[in-house]
Image (cartoon, rainbow, N blue to C red):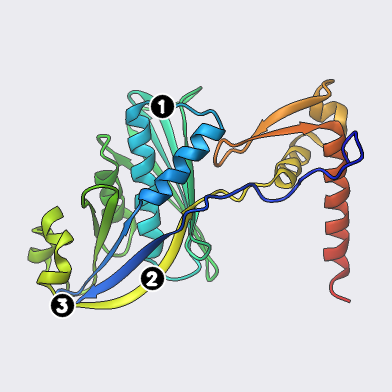
Amino acid sequence: MSEDGSEVDLSDASDGANRIELESHFVRHRNAMVARADFGPLYEDYYLHLMQAEIKLTRDQDELLKDALAALALHLFSHPAGLSAAWTLNFNDPPLNLFVTGDRDSGNVVGRVFTQDVKVGPSNLFYSQVASPRNPVRQSTIEFEGHDLFRIVEAYYVQSEQFPARLFRLGGDEAAMVTAHPDCDMDWYRGLNETLVANLAEDEELGFLERLPYHFGCGCRLITIVKVLTNTFGRDPEQVFAGKEDMSVVCPRCAGSFHLDRPTFAQALDLLDRTEKSEAEGPE
């Protein structure tokens, strides 16, 4: 309960309302797969999130993050069901960390840019963490050069993925990924450009594979933020609030801001306790 006796909203944060469709085809006689989408509606929700969270990015940071969201969505969609992934790219000049994460089955991608207190080394580093139900979490790290996000992801594929992949900007907000499968026509694959990929349906024999909706969204909840706080600082309000009556807490995945006061914190603890008790008792 809040101070006026009303219930405090501890539900999911509002995810983006726009859904885009990613569609994949197998390129017959070339042994390759192409996945593509128009990311315009997803970017609309991304910009709405920046506005609501009062986040300001430079033009270069904005382009990097948008390309990373598109690349991650295409990456997830081009893999089997159950995959989730998180990428962190550490740039040393200028110092910047770019973070994106997403889940193939729920179709969500989200990310943010860090510019404060960024530690850098002699090389740019790409950290990848991938998880799926049948496999343990896999982590990999590669060095990379430049600031073209699509070329960086292609370099990651060469070193860390089973099959190579290329990314293309097809005009407007449309993008595509072409993945080379076993016995791929590599001369054709290496010779692809934006125009050829945009016209694959006219020039090649395609077989439809899959269509899935994706959206920009974190799904962060105030109750989850409170759980993280208690894991770090314990359940004593004096420790959590450091003598204050309220505070703002920021989601580490999307930089969304939550207002948390002591009555809401107490309500969240009660909800966590009831949830844990219910899970321990199991179904009736």
Cα distance in 3D space between marks 1 and 3:
47 Å
Instruction: Name the residue beneath numbered marker 3.
Output: 205
Locate residue 257, reporting x and y percent: 63, 34
Q: Earlier in the sequence, mark 1 or mark 3?
A: 1
Q: Earlier in the sequence, mark 2 or mark 1?
A: 1
* Residue 120 numbered mark, or none: 1
Query: Does residue 219 appear left or right of residue 164 in this picture?
Result: right
Q: Residue at x 32, y 30 (%)?
A: 60
The amino acid pointed to by label 1 is: Val
Residue 110 in sight in this render: yes
Q: Secondary structure at mark 3?
A: loop
The amino acid pointed to by label 2 is: Arg
> With respect to residue 248, does 252 lie above or below?
below
- Residue mark closest to the camera, 2 vs 1: 2
* Residue 92 numbered mark, or none: none
Which quadrant holds residue 256? top right
Locate residue 77, reporting x and y percent: 39, 64
Cα distance in 3D space between marks 3 and 2:
18 Å
The amino acid pointed to by label 3 is: Glu
Locate residue 5, reporting x and y percent: 92, 40
Query: Does residue 136 appear left or right of residue 206 in this picture?
Result: right
